[in-house]
Image: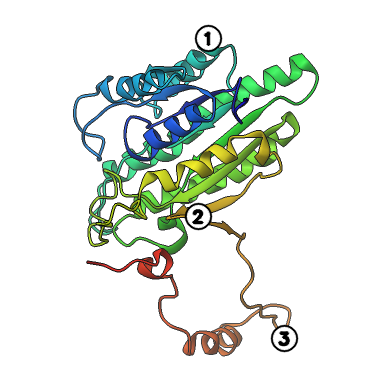
Amino acid sequence: MSLPLDGLSAIVTGAGRGLGRAEALELARLGAAVVVNDYGQPGRDGSGEASAAPAEEVAEEIRAAGGRAVAHLGDVSDHEQARALVELAVSTYGKLDILVNNAGILRDRMIFSMTEDEWDSVLRVHLKGHFNTTHFAAAHWRSRSKESGGPVYGRIVNTSSEAFLAGSAGQPNYAAAKGGIVGLTTSTALALAKYGVTANAICPRARTRMTEDVFAGFQEPKDGRLDALAPEHVSPLVGYLASPAAAKVNGQLLVVHGGMVAIVERPRVAAKFDSSKETFSFDELDELISPYYEDRPPNETFAAAEVLGLKRG
């Protein structure tokens, strides 16, 4: 019996733990040969000595289950290490078909307290890391398409966050990076469609090393049921988006957690005002716009507990 990803190869970055690990295991379960990438630093802020152990352990877990996997210790925010990652997939499996970008770090701070390095490091790992791997994967697919004279198989799944959608007061660097990833995804989707490649982004909610304090107040079930915040709720969507079944899904943003997937629409115009003259004056703008906000709540971002359907302990 054939599996959905039989004959395909994949890279999953940040796959030594948490979401990335669950995604790598799911792609392997669906038949893909996987390159498990993880820089292996113990600190969620990107601190500590790099180690091959996390990536090697996941790769061995895949092989023990009968799948194919190799480990890659590399920092995707480094352009040349990202090149080596893509080259490893191609040299090992003959080609690259699927790229799942998941690697990231946190350096949380309020905007008035954040240092330049805290800003730069998070943007570098998340946004530049996504760009680096996408750049080399895209070049690989474009070259193969030119050689074959037609479209090839390519899937990109990027990792954004609801911190970009709803705001996150103590994470201006993280929210900005995740918003940038959505822009990168939609641009990539348009650029690569003619080569047969799709690019989509997910906003996952999961209890991982990076989010342990964010979800500390949400109780884990005590009756043996799967935690609503388990990464295993996210990985099936990644497997689907990586598969031939999702050929028509391109340039999309999807929120996923706890057995729920929501497709997010692009921003829509909420209100529109036209000047009565050639251009607006200050007074006219005040007369038109200020009343619109008078009866609206000051913060219309949605509450985490409402969307999750969970209660804090």
Q: Which residue is mark 1?
A: 91
Q: Secondary structure at mark 1?
A: helix
Q: Secondary structure at mark 2?
A: strand
Mark 1 or mark 3: which comes first in sequence? 1
Q: Which residue is mark 2?
A: 255
Q: Image check: 294 left or right of 173?
A: right
Image quadrant where one finds the C terminus: bottom left
Q: Nearer the viewer, mark 3 or mark 2?
A: 2
Q: Are marks 3 and 2 in contact (CB under 8 Å)?
A: no
Q: Amino acid at mark 2?
A: Val
Q: Which mark is residue 276?
A: 3
Q: Amino acid at mark 1?
A: Ser
Mark 3 or mark 2: which comes first in sequence? 2
Which residue is outermost to the top? 91
Q: Residue at x 43, y 70 (%)?
A: 302
Point out residue 182 in the picture as x, y percentages from the top left corner.
53, 48
Question: Does residue 3 lie above or below 254 as drawn?
Answer: above
Q: Residues within 10 Å of mark 3 (few under 14, many from 20)?
A: few
Q: Residues within 10 Å of mark 2 (few under 14, many from 20)?
A: many
Question: Does residue 147 lie above or below 257 as drawn?
Answer: above
